[in-house]
Each structure stands twice: as structure tokens, then as C-alpha cells.
Image (cartoon, helix red, strand yellow):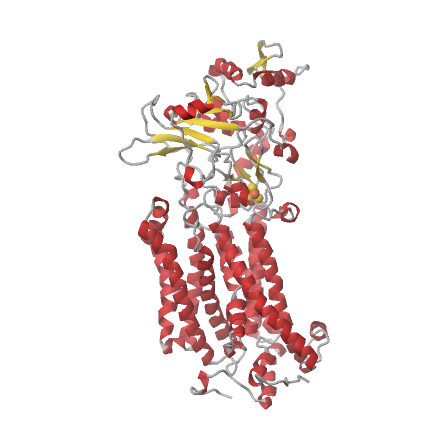
Amino acid sequence: MSIDKAESVKYETFTQEEYMIMKDDLLRPIEKIGIGAKIWIGFLTAVFLAGVFAYYLQETRGKYVTTGLRDYTTWGVYISNFLFLVALSLSSVFMSAILRLTNFQWYRPLSRIADVISLSSITMAGICIMISMGRADRLHHLFIYGRIQSPIIWDIIVVATYFVACVLVLFIALIPSLSTCKNHLHNLPKWQLKMYDILSFGWEGNAEQWKVLKKTVLILTVLIIPLGIALRTVSAWLFSTTLRPEWDSTNFGAYFVSGSALITVATMVIAVYAFRKIYNLENYLTEMHFDKLGQAMVLMGFIYAYFNINEYLVPAYKMSGLHENHLLDLFVGEEALFYWSVVFFGIAVPSILPLFRKMRKPLPLSIIALAVLIAGWFKFYLIVIPGQAHPLLPIQDVPETWKHYTPSLIELTIVAATIAGTLLLVTVFSKFFPIISVWEVAEGKLEGKEEIINYK
Amino acid sequence: MENENNNSSRRNFLRLGALGGIALAGTAIAKAVTDEAPKETGKKVKVLTADGKLVEVDSSHVEHHAMNDNYTSEEIRQGVKGKKFIRVIDLGKCANERKCIEGCQTAHNYIAPVEYIKVKKMQNSELESPYWFPTMCYHCDNPPCTKVCPVDATFKREDGIVAMDYDRCIGCKFCMAACPYSARTFNFGKPEQLKFTEEHGNDTSDPNHCRTPYAQEGTVAKCDFCTDRSEKGLLPACVVECPNGAILHGDELEDVVTNGEDTFRLKKLLQDRGAYRQFEELGTKPRVYYLPPVARNFPFEDATEAHNTKD
Ligand code: SF4
């Protein structure tokens, strides 16, 4: 089953006989949970619980004591982290739906990974909105008094809708796999088998059911793209609908979408690298995938660079009084080191390094992807926080802490918890369900034919 | 936080007499003088009786509205019919004495470093001279803050005031991001402030006391043109407290603004003195006008003292 170089250019195909092996390969991680997995899950749970405790402290002790937020910088890491999680949640759009629609066959083993990352991160993003509210106890006011004119309401509607779409995309495409689990996994607790049974909704794998399933998946695939773009754009509008020069940009929606596309590629690289190593899925998540993802990264990197030029260099050319403070701060001032590192690792590295074939190998590409992700997180920080440091009227005669925001330990713990929560959801999912869509991969082989493998 | 008021009792009277709403205000206060004799505070306030006489009474006789007598959600949404509150700030008269800031803090029961009204040092270019620039909520006619509020917790009243409903605000702070003048401030729950609210929240002894006190924890506060005082025809705390009469408050429909000492015809004042609004180009249509810092009452003296150093 090893794939040699020559073949790796084409997408993977499998014969029917290989299917049985494949099924075993993909079901194995569900059957036994190793000690490593237990430690990992335990660690993530601990971080997540630490975040829950930190949130409890924040709500009981008051935000003045527990956070670094003050007037002027009223939106801190919670908001920038929210933007980052929304970027991750676009994985379904860029790493599954678009590839699926445009017939890039290598999407097949990736689609479920992308979908579960999306669902996990949009869940955490939703939680982030709540955490950043001054009065979380008044959440219901959004429903009682909601005004549709407010971009926050748009954001909440689109986050909720996208969440539902993610659930549907993930679980409908999962039905045939659930039936596989039900029929082939026996040494599992009763409730788990029962769960497979319930969630597979009486799936038998007959031609009629396949027809409905594939149609539904196609419709959802088409739907999730505009929804994801809307989600990303609306979260950019939270900023660009204000009159602050740093945010008041017609470029903002597209700029955010392009940045998120790059971040989803990087996320995918890391996820593929991890699953491939830990679950021994080298036969399905191949070097070819890294090659393709590396190419995608270059493309997205250049698109993102293009929007960055529009966003920063065009105003910098004019250097109007409105932008001056902010831009100089970023380019040569207080935030310069921070800003240029983010540009270097978040734009230059992903646009240039993967141009070289050697850099598109699993390990180097994963290291690049990690750099891109970290830079991506800080990029949102740089958009949100210094963007508030230079209001139109100068900040005068206020305490030092009001001028310079530093996230508190509690805020950082909560942010770490949302990231841990995302990883935890992905990990737990992969322990209960096959992380690669068996039928989609198998279907790749039978492309264009009427008959479909029956799982029984 | 006791407000010393003795040197301005004469002005207090004049101020009362200044607005067109004099009769209304007099009646309201006279009505508030109670029959029983509660504990004397020793502090005298002047009130105008219904028949036009000025009398001095102990402040304990004057019933102020207490904390629990604040506006209800419905009340605060009702603007005063036939009024359009407006403000003109004469930059030539501001000497950064900070009395408006302190007066506002006392009237609304909140403490530094929070300031609804801030006095900034501005200088447009090197060749021009610096001047003091009091800023506050401009109660814009096209307010960017109310536009973005998801729950209608901040809204425009028909009398021009941009008001806050603290009971409804969810603390998303979007209005703060949207306000180009940084006029809003958030109650992050500073322990000193919470303690102060607990101890002095019901303290209505300040003659300039407002029925719209500081925001609850986790909500947004800002200048509210001392809503209840404006409604009653009284001058807001900052106007009363400014020793130089730099802040003029009034009613656009009546075409009058006053600082308690001098009363002007609004339109004529704006036209004669080259009034402008801050960042007109943003289209926010502020209800606060500035008279340029010409014909100054004082030479500009730089303030070396920073007041809000302690977090
Ligand atoms: S912080 Fe309160 S008043 Fe401001 S936009 Fe949010 S809900 Fe409205």
C-alpha cells in the first residue's frame, strides 16, 4: 500500500479488496485508546477546566481586578481570539467544500478532518462571545430586545446558523461511517454502539438512501460556502462599521476572508500531520497531501499578501493624520518588532518557503504551518488591540494601564482554554468516529460509476 | 466628596433665574420641600417658592430623588416634548480648572479616574497656540453608538439626549468602539468604585445631584446632560460648577443657551462667533458646538499635574 513518488502526483485510489484493510485502519483508533491519548485528553481537559475556573473568578471578582481591560482598550484578547477561532472554523469552507465542488479529488480524506475542526472552533468562538460580554447574565436580552440593525446581532445569527450548518455537514456525511462502526466494532461499551445505531438513522446503504445522502451533502456543501464567507465578513464588519480609521476600511471583509483561507490551510497541514502520525494513517494522508497543501498555502499566502498591501501600504502612502499614529506605531514604533514578525512568519514564510518542493514535505511544511498559525493569532491581536490605542481625540491624563493593555493571567488562561477546548472536541470526536470518511475515499475509486460500495 | 458651595450661592440663584424653565423649576423644588423636619445637615440651599420668593432652607428639607427612585426603563426613554437640548462650549473661557469634572463626578456618584467630561490639551499645529478642550458625549443627532447597540440599551430621545438604559445594557462595548469621540466609559467593577457606590449611591445631598447615577457593573456610562436636571429646567452639574462659565446649556427650540450668568440667543451666538462641531466630516451631527479659542479670558497655562495617575 505504500505510495511511491510517481503515483503521488495523482490522487489516491483504492481497489475493492483494499477496502477491507482500509476500514480496519480507519476504525482502529476507535477501538483502543492508548495511554498517550489518555494523557493528551487529560491535559486538554485540565486546561479547559482551568479556563472555566478562571471565568468563574472573572465573573465573581469583577473584570477590573481580573482582566487588563480598561477604557480605550475595551476589546481585548477575547475578541481577537474570537476572530482567530472564526478563521479556524472556515476549514470546512476552504479545505472541504470548495475543493469538493471544484473536483480536487485529494479533498476526500481531508473533508471530515476539516469539518470537525470547523464545528469545534465555531463552538468555542460562540463561547468567546459570551465570555467577552460585560453582563453575561443578560444574554437573553439579545433575544428579547435584539435589534436587527446591529452588526452584533448579525454576528450572532450567522455564528448560530454556521454552527448548525457545521453540525449537519459533519453528521450527515458521517451516517454511512456510523453504520460501518455499528457493524464492525464490537468490543465497545453498549451505549457507544447504541449511539452509532441511533445516529445512523436506520441507514441500510441502499441505492435510494445513497441518492438522498449525496444530494444532501452536495446541497450543504454549496450552502456552507456563502455561510462561511458571511460569517467571516460579518465578524470583520464588527470593526469596519465603526468610524475608527484603523478599522474603517472597505477592504476589511475580503482581507479577513483571505487571512482565514491561509489559516485554514495551515490548520489542515498540522491536523493531517498529527492524525497521520498518531493514528498511522500514512496510506490515506499521504505526502501528496502535503505537496498539495503546500501549494495551496503559497496561493493563499499571495492572496493574503495582496490584501495586506491594500490594507496597510495604501494608507501608509498617503499617511493621513488619521492613520499616522497607528501605522507608524506598527511600522517603526512600539509594535514594530511584533508587527514585522507577524508579517514575516504569517505572510512571507508561507508565500515563499513552500515554493520549494523540499519544504512541502510533511515535517518542514508542518513547522511552517505552525508558524503561520501562531502569527495568525497575533495578527488578529494586532488588528484589535493597537487599533484602539489611537482614538481620534488624544488619550490624556489617564492612568498608564489605560493606555497600554496587557492581557491578565486570567484572560490568557481563558483563551488557552478555548484553544484546548477546540483540540479536545477534535480529539474526542476522532476517538468515537472515523476521522477519515471511509465512503468518500472509496468513492474516489469508483468515481463516475453508478454502483456504490455496500458496507455490509 | 462633599461639594462646597458657599461661594456660589449668588450665582446659584442667578442660574435658576436664567433659563426659560424658571417657573417650572421653582415649582418643582418648592414642592419638594417637605413638611416634616428631618435631621438638619447644616448645609443651606436656596430655593425659589411658587410665588417667586427666594428662601434659604436646610438641604435636608429638599427631597432629592434617591437611588431607588431612579428612572424606570420606560421613563428614561421618554424625551421631554418640545425640547431639544443643546450645548455650546466657549473654548476661550476654559482654563482647565477641572471643576466641571469634579462636579460631574459628585453629581453622578462616581469617582476618578473615570470622567464623563474630560478636558484635553489641544494644539492644531505648531504655529497655533494650545487651548483647553472640554469633551463629553456630544449627544449626536446621527449617533454611531446607538446604531450599533444590539439591544437598544443606548438610544436617542426626542429631546436630543442620547440616553443609556443600564438595566438593559449587556456590556458588549460595541458602542464604545463605535464612538469616535471616546465619550463612553465602562464600569469594569473597580472595587473602590463599587464600595463608593455602596456607601454613597443613595447620597443625594449634592445640590447638583442627578437621578441618573453611575452605571451598574458591567455596563456603559457616559455624560447624559444630567437628564433629570435638564428635564426640570435646571442646569447640569458641569455648567453650574464651571467658575468661568465656559459651558452653555440650553434648548435649541427655544433658541437659548446659558451658563447661569449670561444667557444667549443660540443661533446668533453660533453665527457670530464662528462656532463649529468636532469632526463635522464624520457626519455624526453633534449637539455640542464649540466657539473657537479666540478672545481668551486667560493666557494658556500648561498643566504639569497629571490627575489620574492612579489606576
Ligand atoms: S455596551 Fe451596552 S449600550 Fe453599548 S452597545 Fe453594548 S449593549 Fe448597547
Quadrant assignment for ligand 1: top right
| Position in image of residue B283 (x %, y %) | 45, 40
Q: Nearer the viewer, residue B153 or A310?
A: A310
Considering only vertical position in the picture, is B160 above or below A377?
above
| Position in image of residue A257 (x %, y %) | 47, 61
| Position in image of residue A456 (x %, y %) | 68, 85
Considering only vertical position in the picture, is B35 above or below B186?
above
| Position in image of residue A196 (x %, y %) | 69, 74
Residue A43 in sight here: no
Q: Residue at x 40, y 31 (%)?
A: B276
Residue B75 occupies quadrant: top right
Decide if residue A166 is on the left or right side of residue A348. right
Residue A251 occupies quadrant: bottom left
Residue B20 in sight here: yes
Q: Most extreme residue toward the left, as rendered? A: B127
Q: Residue at x 41, y 74 (%)?
A: A295
